Amino acid sequence: MNLNKNQKETIRGYLFVAPVLLLLFLFSLYPLFKTIYFSFFDIRLASMNRKVFAGWKNYRLLFTRVNPSFFSQILPATVYYVVGSVAGQIGFGFLLAILVQQKFVKGREAIRAIIILPWVVSGIIIAISWRFMYEPRLGVLNYLLASMGVGNPPTWLNDERLVMGCLVVANIWHGMAFSFIIQTSGLHSISDEVMEAALVDGANGFQRLTLIIIPLVRQFLVLNLILTSMATINSFDLIFAMTNGGPMFKTEVISVQMYHRAFGFGRLGEGSAIATIILLMNLILTIFYMRMNKNQSEGGDG
Amino acid sequence: MRSKRSLLLKVITYAIILMWIIFTIGPLYWLLSSTFKPSSEAIGYPPTLFPKNPTLQNFKNLFTASRFNFYSYGHSFIIGCGAMFISLLVAMFAGYGLSRVHFKGKQIVMTTILLFQMVPILATLIPLYQTFSRYGLYNTHLGLMLIYATQTAPMNTWLLKGYFDTIPYSIEEAAQIDGLSRLATLYRIALPIAAPGLSASTIFAFFKAWNEYMVALTMTSTVRPYTVELYRFIGEQGDVDWSLLGTAALIAVLPVFILFSFFQKYFIIGMSGGAIKS
């Protein structure tokens, strides 16, 4: 074969990336399309090789089922969980990033390490820790309440009204580090001169925050918002191990429902339909994310 | 007046930071400290902040008396190492190729790899389960290794490409003129220089696998990593033995904490999924 130098380079390039592409195609792209394909079939866990075409039935089932009902149980639970977690993580992440950044704070590195700590712990251990905290009879929370004189302490994870709040707190605790890191690097991107100029001009703390810091780190906040929303929609490990969707479907978010349908009830087709819907949500957020990335590299401040 | 206000500001700042630190450490401390308490004390009333009668009995119980399968740590370790190895191997070649070889469609390949980073495991789990059951990968180390490696490979490719980019190409060119092949240059010259990048990827790929449990729960029946074992432990028993759970959890998080304290920067780069490049 007579190949010129450019062609040889191209072949060489593709040989280098072939292994990673093979891995990604086999274990990510192919199953991804298969999920969409499966969502139009009736497939049972017990007899996986038998597929019966079902049309839109799996999607219809998700929206028409009564227990749990999509519109009055799954959707509110998902929205509550995602909005609560995202708002809490970004809010506290931003606040703490600013506080730890202050010039007078000592031991900054150690404080950062502690704040990030929950992030490197396995989800199952976090679930166990928080179950121990919330435990109605033995938990430390109710002990504290009792010692403060509360006569009738709540049952936390067994309480329909409190359970979602409990999960959101645990999830904020777990995921806040990511926002903290992103916002810290956002604050780093503001030059000292800008802040000093603001001080010279007599801007007070509130003005510095709203007129200088927030506009300058806006991109980081939006990026944070997108990535954290995606991560929260896709996560099911914490809820799965803490409440498993209960009590009374109060914490049955869409990802947990997907798992229950597929592996609890053995309806792989239905699970696939739900996964496809979650995938759509991701796709929308990914498009936003790609736009952001593009703006960032064009703007040159990323 | 001015200094009084700034003092107040300092106090508030420290107070909030301190509160968050207590909030951060509290739940973990509560669980992990039960390791050193006898079962009766761990669930006793009132709860004790420090173990009153420190004991190592729980470690012994975990080894011998409990139904907790101690080999699960071994499974986790093997799976973590395998996932790390596969991920690093493919990412190393791809990262080098993307950094050093100029070929048509390179930009598209790079974006494609980045996009895979966005695929949630949830969206591939059902077909993976079906395929793995059919081809004998269900309940094997290799099956989990492949899934975990797939999850970390895109990020690792980008990380390593970045590290190769920082190495001046002239060193390698000189080596190639001396007669080394492209592969040999990668292995003899670029790899040693890219070692920091490699260690970042190593830690990241290992701990993704070490911490994961939903995929493991789905894909295993007997070859259970410790995370699945922990899940069953709280799921099956009516009365949870918290001090045994705390002990099992402590054994799992201790290596993570130690490595985290040494390689904090690498953890952050890897786990933030490239959002932070610092």
Image: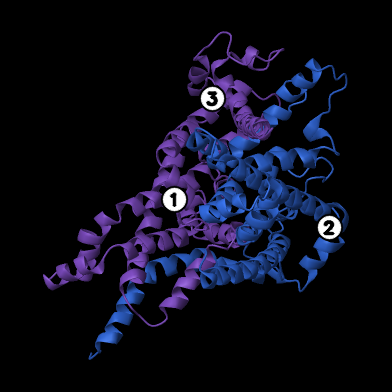
Chain colours: A blue, B purple
Separation of residues labelled 1 and 3 (CA atoms): 25 Å
Nearer the observer, B192 or A300: A300
Separation of residues labelled 1 and 2 (CA atoms): 36 Å
Q: Are marks 1 and 2 on the same chain?
A: no
> Circle 1 is placed at which residue position?
B205
Q: Amino acid at mark 3?
A: Thr
Q: Residue at x 72, y 39 (%)?
A: A169
Q: Is residue A190 visible?
A: no
> Circle 2 is placed at which residue position?
A70
A156 relative to A253, above or below: above
Dot 2: element: helix
Q: Amino acid at mark 1?
A: Ala
Q: Is residue B218 left or right of residue B172?
A: right
Q: Is residue A114 left or right of residue A221?
A: left
> Circle 3 is placed at which residue position?
B247
| x and y, in percent, of residue A32 in the image | 59, 67
Nearer the observer, B61 or A8: A8
Nearer the observer, A177 or A191: A191
